[in-house]
Image (tube, rainbow, N blue to C red):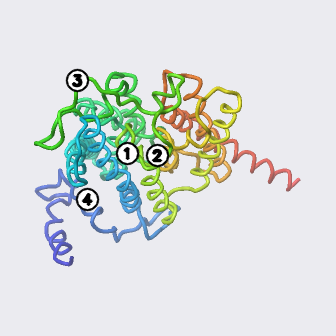
Amino acid sequence: MSFLRNYLNKIKPNFEPGGRLQAFRSVFDGFETFLYVPNTTSRTGVSIHDAIDSKRIMSIVVIALLPALFFGMYNVGYQNYMAAGADGTFLELMAYGALAVMPKIIVSYIVGLGIEFAWAQWKGEEIQEGYLVSGIIIPMVLPVGCPLWVIVLAVAFAVIFGKEIFGGTGMNIFNVALLARAFLFFSYPTVMSGDTVWVSTGSILGLGNDLPDAFTAATPLGEMAQGAAPTAALCDSVVGLIPGSIGETSVIAIALGAVILLWTGIASWKTMLSVFVGGGVMAAVFKATGQTPVEWYEHLALGGFCFGAVFMATDPVTSARTECGKYIYGIMVGALAVIIRVMNPGFAEGMMLAILFGNMMAPTIDYFVVQRNINKRIKRGA
């Protein structure tokens, strides 16, 4: 790769102050630092130097998301063929799903990174890398039937009002991907709910089959919101062969991503475990009181609970940062997600609202944890 390094060094003066392409300095810096770890370090202030920077962290998270993404593509093809009453090979199902999902990912990255680049140029700052993860998560938490123009609006809203207004990556209060989903949920509810949005209709480039005029593709959570037990077997929910958002259906694929995040130390096991504990305990309480038709462990396997617990609740920017606060934050998010599911059928998927509420409360949780530690030290000193 030395030829690439030499080429970048050769053209770099063009982007430095005084060069003919200095207006695009932040764009060049963004690509260079994505390919190579910068060899410059801060010279003033208190800094922590590590072998891995934020771009490398974002790249690991993207890798952890790939199992859920690839399975989501397969499931999109599987649901289409099943609804059409047709059979297809693995490659046919995968190809159909890829052609249905990839345009959404491409649009998400083009719009999101375009805004990031324009914002950085306008402010004369470096391009921030946080959208590397948000750009792939946003399509994964949306129904496959979501129109591209709606994704454009959601991404623009989330990036501008959810991140850049607060100061960019590391300063945002709310999870950017969940803000995009919440924007669509409340602004365009018809593209986020109903039985038809979970299955890609029609054929794509000759792949797939035209769906019948009427078919049922209700999600297990949608059925549960009507007071009925899900028709899908628990094993199907674990494997992921059920209607749902693109990346949220397979517990196994999400678990593979969780292993990567925990093994690399990117995500906190305390937050992740606490979300499952909080959700499991609350689901058990509702089951014991007859408020829910499913067992407590089924709640953890349905909808976006696992995906939210692994990839969103553990977001180091928007979650609690103190060690004790991570337990409180996780338990609150998990319990609140089940409460919303059971007590308010209008919001069948409670994980989105639970994490956004947790994001809002995380600074307060950390504040009281820190103050408690300060008070304990004062008492010991006295």
Can you tell which quarter of the image residue 143 is in?
top left
Residue, disc 3: 213
Residue, disc 1: 247
- Left or right of 253? Residue 316 is right
> Label 1 crowding class (10 Å Cα cut-off): few <14, some 14-19, many 20+?
many
Q: Nearer the viewer, mark 4 or mark 2?
A: 2
Q: Which quadrant does the N terminus fall into? A: bottom left
- Marks 1 & 2, CB-CB < 8 Å contact: yes
Instruction: Identify which residue, 331 or 207, lies in the foreground.
Output: 207
Residue type of the residue flagged with mark 4: Asp
Residue 350 point in image, percent of width and height: 52, 32
Residue, disc 2: 307
Mark 3 / mark 2, whichever is N-terminal: 3
Instruction: Identify which residue, 22 or 302, lies in the foreground.
Output: 302
Instruction: Identify which residue, 310 or 268, lies in the foreground.
Output: 310
Residue, disc 4: 29
Residue 245 point in image, percent of width and height: 37, 38
> Label 3 crowding class (10 Å Cα cut-off): few <14, some 14-19, many 20+?
few
Mark 4 / mark 2, whichever is N-terminal: 4
**SS for callout 1:** loop
**SS for callout 3:** loop
Mark 1 / mark 4, whichever is N-terminal: 4
